[in-house]
Image (cartoon, rainbow, N blue to C red):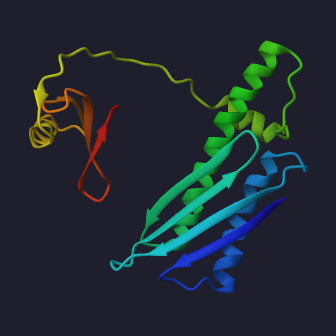
Amino acid sequence: MLNFNIRGENIEVTPAIREYVENKIDKVERYFNEDVNANANVNLKVYNDKQTKVEVTIPMKNLTLRAEERHNDMYAAVDLIVDKLERQIRKHKTKVNRKFREREGAGLYFATSQATVDAVSEEEEYSIVRTKQFDLKPMDQEEAVLQMNMLGHDFYVFTDAESNGTNIVYKRKDGKYGLIETT
C-alpha cells in the first residue's frame, strides 16, 4: 500500500490534483505483492515561466524509485513520471528474476503476472556498441566547455590543469553548464 506525501511549491495542492496524482501513481502498486508498504513522496513545483516540475521518490527496503519530469502541463508530467517509474520497476524486476534463476530459491518480492512478464521480455539488455579512447588534455573549465560545444556533445571529460584531476563538464537541460569533479 502506498501512502502519499504530496507537497506543492508555488502551487496549491487541490483535492483534484491530489486525486489525480494518487490515482496515477497508485498504478505502480500492481507490480508489487500486497505486503509492500511504502511512502510516495511527491513534490510539485511551478516556475515563473509556468513550467511545472514533478518529482516522485518511493523508498523501499531493496529499491528506491525516483523520477523527475518537467512539462508545461502538470498532468502530462505526472503521466510521464508513471511511465518512468514503471520502466525502473521492470528493469529491477528483470535483474531480480535473473538472480533468482541463477541462485534457484531467492525470494521475489514482486507480484508476477502475465502482463509484467510480457513487459519485462520486451526490455533490452545494455550493450556497448562503440568504444573510444583518447588522451585527456590538461585545460581549464572554460576551454573544456568550448571543446564540448565544438564537438557538439552534451558532456566532455578533461584533466583539470590546476588540480590534475579528471573532471567532466556537461550541458544541463536549462541550457547552463555543470561540472563534475572527481576526487
Against 177, residue 137 (above or below) is above
Q: Quadrant of the C terminus?
A: top left
Name the one closer to the observer, 167 or 154. 167
Question: What residue is drawn where x is 69% and y is 64%?
Answer: 24
Against 61, residue 52 (above or below) is below
Residue 150 placed where, x, y %? Answer: 10, 37
Question: What residue is drawn where x is 12% and y is 30%?
Answer: 161
Against 84, residue 118 (above or below) is above
Question: What residue is drawn where x is 34% and y is 80%?
Answer: 48
Drawn side of residue 176 relative to residue 97, left or right: left
Q: Quadrant of the N terminus?
A: bottom right
Image-quadrant location for residue 176: bottom left
Image-quadrant location for residue 18: bottom right
Question: What residue is drawn where x is 73% and y is 39%?
Answer: 62
Drawn side of residue 36 relative to residue 140, left or right: right
Name the one closer to the observer, 70 or 80. 70
Drawn side of residue 62 relative to residue 69, left or right: right
Against 15, residue 118 (above or below) is above
Drawn side of residue 117 relative to residue 161, left or right: right
Total number of numbered labels? Answer: 0
Image-quadrant location for residue 50: bottom left
Residue 121 placed where, x, y %? Answer: 68, 29
Residue 143 placed where, x, y %? Answer: 9, 38
